[in-house]
Image: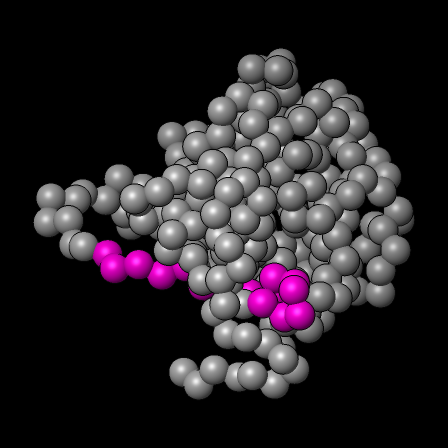
Amino acid sequence: MQACHRGGVTPWQCPGVDGQISALKVSCRCFISSDGVADYIWTKLAQPGEDILAVGQRRYEREDTLFSHENCKMADLRGSLVGMLVAFPMAVDEEYEETDPMAVIRRAKASDASALADLAERTFRDAFSAQNIATDIDLHCTTNFGTGIQRREILDPDWVTLLAEVDKVLSAYAQVRLRSPQQCVLAKRPSELLRLYVSRDLHGRGIAHELMPEVLATAASNEADVVWLGVWEENPRAIAFYRKYGFEIVGAHEFRLGEEIQRDLIMAVTLQLIRSQSK
């Protein structure tokens, strides 16, 4: 790679990468440039109440270890930090066993309908049975889940169903309706994220974070300008998750669960930046 000096950039000049301030700068750049990887790892390492940037700071303050300011090179432009390179040799651990494999994400086929129906019902029951009446859960599942129902959804040209497999086992899914207007969503071509569920035994493994970029890219590639969704107002964990991807509350609507009428919050995010990056 040829270094570029245009504009007065001094390539990989290290402006004193020791001490708290430099470690914090390193952690900020790592968080921004890692495409969600730092967010995922540092969240797992955070102490109760600890900000994830503080996690990155204390990791890069260390010495005599791989993830350290000692292995960072900085690019300085007229006194401002504009770039960073973290590099170190990696040894092969012959005894390593994969314990947290990445998901393989693909579009569903008609032949996936039975497995998808089983996963969809199981994850819905896991998510909501504890807070709702059993008969309402049963009625909802009978109405919305089944091999024939999921096959029609998969084959519907206005729907995209994404599957995530871990160790070749169907473990999570998301469904996007490409053309789905909603009164409180201001958009010319809105898409709706209808469902996003992960098998309970894989919660905390980052599978939802692998699925969500695919959801947004799917909507963007189909010329959507906004993605919206409905989330139960009593599900703060899901609300917080969607906020990480820029979704904001724009309204509310009714959601029928069996015989009970509940209130879902409508959250939406614009896709102008995502669409421009996907072209």
Query: Residue 81 location in percent, x, y?
Result: 61, 62
Q: What stretch is highlighted in magenta?
A: 76-90
User: Is the residue 35 above or below the residue 12 in the image?
Assistant: above
Question: Does 89 appear in magenta?
Answer: yes
Query: Residue 153 location in percent, x, y?
Result: 57, 53
Q: Nearer the viewer, residue 148 or 179?
A: 179
User: Is the residue 223 above or below the residue 103 in the image?
Assistant: below
Outermost residue to the left: 94
Identify which residue is drawn at 10% across, 49% down. 94
Q: Is residue 74 visible?
A: yes
Q: Which of 208 and 183 is in front in this view?
A: 208
Query: Residue 80 location in percent, x, y?
Result: 65, 63
The reply, left or right, for residue 86 in relation to residue 159 is left
Identify which residue is drawn at 59% across, 32% down. 51
Q: What quarter of the picture does the C terminus occupy?
A: bottom right
The reply, left or right, for residue 183 in relation to residue 120 is right
Identify which residue is drawn at 72% across, 62% down. 271
Q: Nearer the viewer, residue 82 or 48?
A: 82
Q: Can residue 146 be seen in this view?
A: no
Query: Residue 241 location in percent, x, y?
Result: 62, 38
